[in-house]
Amino acid sequence: MNDFVFHNPDRVHFGKKCLKELPNELLKLGKKVLLVYGGGSIKRNGLYDEVCTLIKDNGMELFELSGVEPNPRHTTANKGAQICKKEGIDVVLAVGGGSTIDCSKGIAAAAVTDDLDVWPLVSGGVWVTKALPVVAVLTNAATGSEMDAWAVISNMETNEKIGLGGSALIPRAAFENPEWTYTLPHYQTACGAFDIFNHVLDNYYLAGDATFDLLLDMQEAVMRTVVKWAPVALKDPKNYEARANLMWASSMALNGILDGGTVHFCVCHMMEHELSAYYDITHGHGLAIIAPRWLEYILDENTAPAICRLGVKVFGIDAALDSMTGAKKTIEALENFCFNTLGLQSNLSDLGIDDKHIDDMVSHCCGGRNVPGIKTLTPDDIEKIYRMCL
Ligand code: NZQ
Ligand code: ZN
């Protein structure tokens, strides 16, 4: 187990009545609030009215930026940064899913720069230590952005989708009422669920030789939670327990607790961000197509025991099986979960993706270097995995 520092300053308000604390959290940060949201789901489900009323009734001044895209663009973040500068905004309030929260983080970071442009920060890999404060009202259980230090921003002109990180990007407060996710479409529920699962899976094997059992057990608990509750939420979208378990699993998967003593490295995520950058697909769906193929590709005598452990602990595979047989059954179970239980289409061709951009995606993903992980992958390996997904 490696040494580590854990610090997460985000105050999470969780549950049916949590929004009543929103004015208190905002007023700690200032009175001029920029409300950021997406394509209108919050207007349709009533959350928009509720938030606006709370802000206005408590003496705050409200400004708005709507229309944040799924896979949020740097240009939208820059628009928000300009509003912040012009109006002297004190706090950026994201109400939505990961895209809205990420865009808000991009706004918050760009707003304190001279040129009000987020892209040099993103493309320059700048670790953001100065930004306007962000508060998140979460409507989708998926990305973990509500509690983490990351924002993923896309530049569609250059086909780049890159993570912007920084301690200043962790929301100061997050609000999580599982009822807000009742209106999520079936597809977004499925994609979000797999995103949560994959945040842990991408990190799982990097814990090394299992000397840190606490960490592995916690990681497995999050993945088991997704496997248990996602099908319930899909069948019964207003099942509070299912939505609540998924929502908290979303936050737990990336809030830093599961990184303790290990290295966070995300091969499936690196590969998926290239797919979104070129084809603007839904993040969790791309991951569901890649993850089983990645496991299949890396399976050998060395990796079989770890893959088998995943099957035993998360999918209930028979622990008495030899590790190679158990690992193969694990991959079958994962495919069954992604493509039958969650109902996601299994190939890139189903999303209209062919091999046209594979060379570029490999080169962006690897940057000419090998990708570390339970098994180190060369650019050639990454290309083969993409081809297995076609
Ligand atoms: O835009 P609106 O109208 O709000 O509709 C959204 C959008 O169409 C809709 N939606 C969200 N909550 C809803 C709802 N519809 C009805 N009822 C609700 N309660 O769902 C659609 C997708 O929303 P989006 O925010 O794009 O989804 P998600 O939360 O999955 O976020 C995806 C983005 O986050 C990035 C992804 O790459 C992608 O760009 N990620 C961010 C991470 C981070 N910050 O740490 C890590 C992740 O690995 C991921 O990369
Ligand atoms: Zn993700």
Image (cartoon, rainbow, N blue to C red):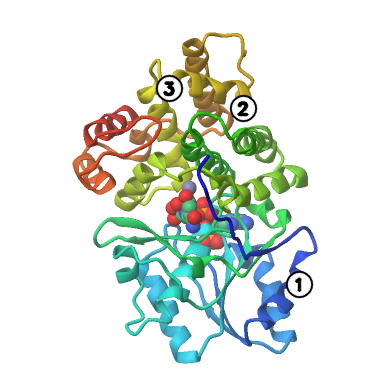
Position of 129 relative to 99 (above/below): below
Residue 238: image location, x then y, percent: 74, 47
Looking at the rendered image, the quarter that the C terminus falls into is top left
**Relative to the observer, which residue lies in front, 203 or 42?**
203
Q: Could you tell me which secondary element the residue under label 3 belongs to?
A: loop
Left or right? Give the position of 253 relative to 105.
Answer: right
Left or right? Give the position of 365 relative to 233.
Answer: left
What residue would you read off at disc 1? Answer: 21
- Upstream in the sequence, badge 3 or badge 1? 1
Left or right? Give the position of 300 relative to 260.
Answer: left
Q: Give the distance between the C-alpha atoms of the residues marked 1 and 2, in whole angstroms.
A: 36 Å
Label drawn at residue 303: 3
Position of 187 relative to 182 (above/below): above
What residue would you read off at disc 2? Answer: 314
Left or right? Give the position of 336 relative to 78.
Answer: right
- Name the residue rendered at 58%, 29% in the picture: 341
- Image marks 3 and 1: residues in contact by CB distance under 8 Å: no
Tag in front: 3 or 1: 3
- Image marks 1 and 2: residues in contact by CB distance under 8 Å: no
Q: Give the distance between the C-alpha atoms of the residues marked 3 and 2, in whole angstroms.
A: 17 Å
- Upstream in the sequence, badge 3 or badge 2? 3
- For disc 2, the neighbor class at 10 Å (few under 14, some 14 to 19, many from 20) is many
Position of 71 relative to 246 (above/below): below
Amino acid type, label 2: Val
Residue 93: image location, x then y, percent: 58, 73
**Relative to the observer, which residue lies in front, 124 or 2?**
2
